[in-house]
Image (spheres, helix red, strand yellow):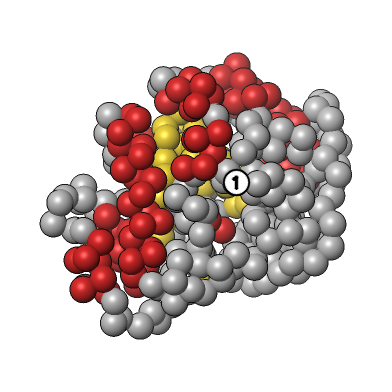
Amino acid sequence: MSLSRRTLLIVAAGSALAGCQATARPAERVMAAVPAGAAPATPEPAAPVISAAPSAPTAPVTQVAQAAPAAPAGPAFTRAVAVDRYGAVEPADWGLEVPGVITALPDGEQATALTFDACGGPGGSAYDADLIELLRSHDVPATLFLNARWIDANPAEFESLAGDPLFEIANHGTLHRPLSVTGRSAYGIAGTGDAADAYDEVAGNREKLAALLGHPPRFFRSGTAHYDDVAARIAADVGQRLAGFTVNADGGATFTGSQVRQEVAATPPGGIVIAHMNHPAGGTAPGFGAALPALLVAGRRFVRLSDVLG
C-alpha cells in the first residue's frame, strides 16, 4: 500500500520504545506514526532474496524545508542561554517533519543514505554484529546514531566502529527521548520537559562523542525521531544537524527479514533509510543481506550523510 508521507499507516505494535526494548513496536512504513498495540512479527533467518510480491511504488522523495546548517556550538550557547532564549517560547509544530529536520538527500542526488540507530537502555543495548559485517563485506557506508547508554554498554564495539572510515558516528541522544520543550511523548516515551532538558539530551551525548572521537558529531536524531520546532532550534544552536528519514526499513527492529528486504529494495534514490543495529535477533541483518546485493548490481550508490550533506 503506497501512502503519502503524512498519512498514518496503522500497524501492529509491541512496546513504545521504537526498537530500544526487547519487545518493540513496529514503526511507520514510510514516515508514518504508529500507536502501541499488539506483538511484533517474528524475524526470519538470513536467506536468498525472497520472492514476495514487490512493494507498491514508493512516494517520490521530498525534502522538508531545512534550516541553514548549524554552526559548531561554542561556549556562548550554554544550558543557561538555551533556557533564557527558548524557555518562554511555545512550540507551533511537532512530529517527524518539523522545520530543520532533513528527511531526504538533496534534490537530484541518486545515492541512498543508510542510517542505523542504537538506542541503549534496557533491552536496547545489544549489538548486531552480523549487520555490521554485512555492510563491511559489501563496502557499504552508513551513518550510525549511537545513544550514550549504548556506548557505555559496548565500549569495544564503539571503538571498532569509530575507527572504521566506512562509518560515520552520529548523536542519538543522552537518554533516548523525543525532543520537546513541553514533555510531549511519542510511542509512550515522555519527551524532554523543557528547554533545559532538550539542551541536556542533545549536548550531553554530543560532548561525550566529541571527547571519544576527538571532534563533535555533525548529526543528531532524537529518540523516536520526533521533535517540536523549538527543541529543534535548540539542537541546531548546540551545533547539530537534525536527521529524519524517508523510509523506515525495519519497523523499530520488529519486521521480518522479508519485510525488511521489501522496504530496502523499494527505497528510491535520494532516500534516507532508518533501521536499527541493536537487535541482532531481528530481521534487520537478514533483510539487508537479501536486498543489498541486487541494489549494488543495479548500480545503487550508498553514502554517509556527511558525504552529501557536508
> Foreground: 125 or 276?
125
**Rendered-image quadrant of the N terminus:** bottom right
Task: Answer above or below: position of 154 versus 117.
Answer: above
Q: Position of residue 303 (x, y in %)?
A: 45, 34
Task: Answer above or below: position of 136 versus 220.
Answer: above
Identify the residue at the far left of this view: 76
Identify the residue at the far top of this view: 137
Q: Position of residue 237 (x, y in %)?
A: 25, 59
Q: Position of residue 45 (x, y in %)?
A: 84, 30
At label 1, the amino acid type is: Gly
The residue that mark 1 highlights is: 121
Judge left or right: residue 64 versus residue 5: left
Q: Position of residue 306 (x, y in %)?
A: 35, 38
- Helix, strand or loop at label 1? It is loop
Number of other residues with Cα within 10 Å of mark 1, as a class: few under 14, some 14 to 19, many 20 or more:
some
Q: Residue at x 30, y 33 (%)?
A: 211
Q: Quadrant of residue 273?
A: top right
**Rendered-image quadrant of the C terminus:** top left
Q: Residue at x 52, y 48 (%)?
A: 271
Residue 219 visible in this rendered orientation of the protein: no
Q: Quadrant of residue 137?
A: top right
